[in-house]
Amino acid sequence: MNATSFENRPSSSLVQGPHVLVVSNHWGAKSASPSAGIFVDRQIISLKKAGAQISTFDIGLSYSPVSIIRKWLELRTLVQSLNPDIIHGRYGTIVGFVTALAGKSSVISFCGGDLLPGASIPLLRQRFGVLLSNLAALRAKRLICVSEELRQALWWRKKQALVIPDGIDLEMFSPGEQQFARRELGWNAHNPIVILNVRNDPKAKGLDLAKEVIRLVQSKIPSVELKVIENVPPHRMPLHYQAADALLCLSLSEGSPNVVKEALACNLPVISTPVGDVTERLAGVHPSKVVARNVETIAEAIVPILKERQRSNGRDFVTSLGLDTIAQRIMEVYRAALGRGLEPNRNADALRLEEPKVIPITDGESVREVASLHMEAFAGYLNTLLGRGYALAFVKWFVKSKGAIAIAAVDRNGKVVGYALGAPEGYGQTLNRELFGVVASSIVVRPWLFLNLQLWRVLIARVRVLLGLPLMTRPALELPKPSISLVAIGVDARQRRSKIGQRLMETFESKARESQMCSGVLSVYENRTGTRRFYEKCGWQPDGGQVSIGSVIRYFKVFQSSHVASLSDETPSSKRGV
C-alpha cells in the first residue's frame, strides 16, 4: 500500500482545501517504466499547490480476484482511518470500480483504454475493463473524461461527465535550441529526425506502421531517421521534443495523448491519426496535420515538414493546458462533488467548467466565424451595417497585418465563442486606406446609409485621421511607447458569464507584452456601462480624453512601465478605424 496521511488535519476542510484520497495503480509500475503515470504524479503536485490535501492509495498491478478483494478491503479501512472528503480514482476499470465502492463520495477520471479498445491486452479483459468502468460511472459522484471521444464512449451519464484533459508542465516543456538538444542526446546534427513514443506498448502505439512510413519517406529523403522513445526518464523528454523535427502519433486509440500536448508546447510539428482529442489540439497548428491511418497518406504529410524543417506555432494552442490551470478546474469538480460549487448536470455546464482554448485566428473558416460573431456583438454599429463583406475584410486585415493581434476563443468542438483584435496604435490610417474600396462598395449598395448620422460622424473622423489631425477633445495621458490599440473584443451572447472575455483580455495583454508593447489603449462609447465595467475590472483606466465620434471614452493600461507620464502639452493623435 502506498498511503500518505495528514497529522493534525482540521476537522473542516473549509479551513483548508479538501482532503482528497487519490487511487491509482501506476506506482508499482515505475520500477519497470520511470514514466509510468507521470501525468498523475504531476497532477497531484499541482493539486497540492492549488490547496488540496492529498493522500494516495496504490491498487497494485495484480488482476487476481483475491488480490482485488484484499485491496478493496484495505482501501475501505484506509478511508475509515483518514476520513477524506473525497476519493479520486485516476483511471477506470478496476481502479474506478474499487474507488466507487470505497465508502465515500468519488470522482473518477477516464483516460483512454478504460473506455476504448486498442491496448495490446486480451479482448475479454478489455471488454471486462470497459464494463467495470461503466459500472463505476453509475456510482461515482462526478466523472471526468480527458476527451470528448471518451465522454461519448460512456454507456450512460454522458451529460454528467466533464471533459478536462490532463495538464502539462509548460515550464519543463518549452521550445529550445535544436543543436544543443541533439548534442545532449548524441544525435546526428544534420539528419531530419522523426520521433515516436511507444512507452511499453509498441503495437498499440503504431511502431510497425511508423517503420513502414519512414521507409517510404526515405525514398524522397534518404537521410531521415526514426527515433523510438521508450522508457526515457521524464526529465529528459523535453530534449527529445527540442531535438526532433516531427512527432508521429499513430496509436490505435488514445484519450488525450500527453505526448502530443508536450510536443506542441515545444513547438514540434505533429503528424497524427485522428485519435482522442488530437484533431482538436492540432486545429490551427502549422506545420502539423491529422491524417488517415494509411502509410502513403502519412508519408505524404510528413515529407514537406521534413524538407522545410520549421518549428510549429503549437505552443500558442496549449497555453490553457498548464498544470495549474487544469488543477483549478479539477478543484472545481471537487467542490461540486461536495456541494460547494457548480452543479455540472448538463452539457452547457460542462462547457462552462472547461475553459476554451485561445488560439490565433487563421485565414479560413475561423475568419468567417469571427466575422459572424463580430456582426452579432456589434449589431447596429456602422462596421456591421456595412455588411458581412466588410466584416470579413475587417477581420482579415488584422489576421494578415504585421504586428497585429488576432485571437479567438474556441470551445471543445472548435466553435468560435469569442475573439479579440488589436494593432499598434496609429493603425487607423493603413486600415482606412486599404479597406476604402470595401467601404465604398458597401455604401453604394446600401444608399440608405447616407441618412445615417453615425456614418457622417465616422467619415469625418476618418478624414481627420488621414490628415493626421487629433480626435481627442482634450489632451490625453502620454503613455509609454510603443502602444497597442485593442480595437474589438466580443463574446458569444450564450457564453457571457463564462469568463471568456477575461481570458481573451489576459491573452491579448500577454501577446502585447511579448511584442514589447509598453501600453494599450481602447475606446468605448460612454453609455456602454457594462462594457466599461468589464474593462475596469480587467485593470484598464479611463484617461479622461473624449474622442469626437459621439461620446466615446478612451481607456488605457500600462503593460511594462511603473508609471504614467503627466498630461502632455501636445495632443497625440488617436487613429482608430471603424
Image (spheres, rainbow, N blue to C red):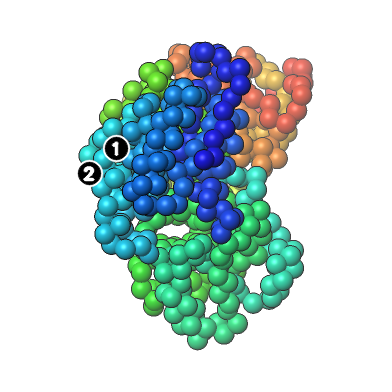
Residue 116 in the image: above or below residue 377: below
| 477 with respect to 437 (left or right) | right
Residue 229 appears in view = yes
Residue in the picture at 60% in, 33% down = 509
Quarter of the image holding residue 469?
A: top right
Element type where label 2 sits in the image: loop
Residue in the picture at 70% in, 40% down = 516
Viewer-proximal residue among 186 and 468: 186
| 153 with respect to 326 (left or right) | left
Tell me if mark 2 has few (under 14), some (14-19) or many (20+) residues whose alpha carbon lies within 10 angstroms of its own: some
Q: Mark 1 highlights which residue?
A: 137
Viewer-proximal residue among 536 and 485: 536
Quarter of the image holding residue 142?
A: top left
Residue 88 in the image: above or below residue 114: above
Quarter of the image holding residue 156?
A: top left
Element type where label 1 sits in the image: helix
| Number of on-image labels | 2
Residue 338: percent from left, percent from top: 40, 20
Residue 130 in the image: above or below residue 513: below
N-terminal of the two: label 1 or label 2? 1
Q: Given the image, on which type of amino acid does mark 2 rest?
A: Trp
Residue 28: percent from left, percent from top: 53, 50
Residue 551 appears in view = no
Viewer-proximal residue among 308 and 97: 97
Q: Mark 2 highlights which residue?
A: 155
CB of mark 1 within 8 Å of CB of mark 2?
Answer: yes
Residue 332: percent from left, percent from top: 45, 26
Query: Residues under labels 1 and 2: Cα distance?
Result: 9 Å
Viewer-proximal residue among 181 and 360: 181
Residue in the picture at 26% in, 59% down = 124
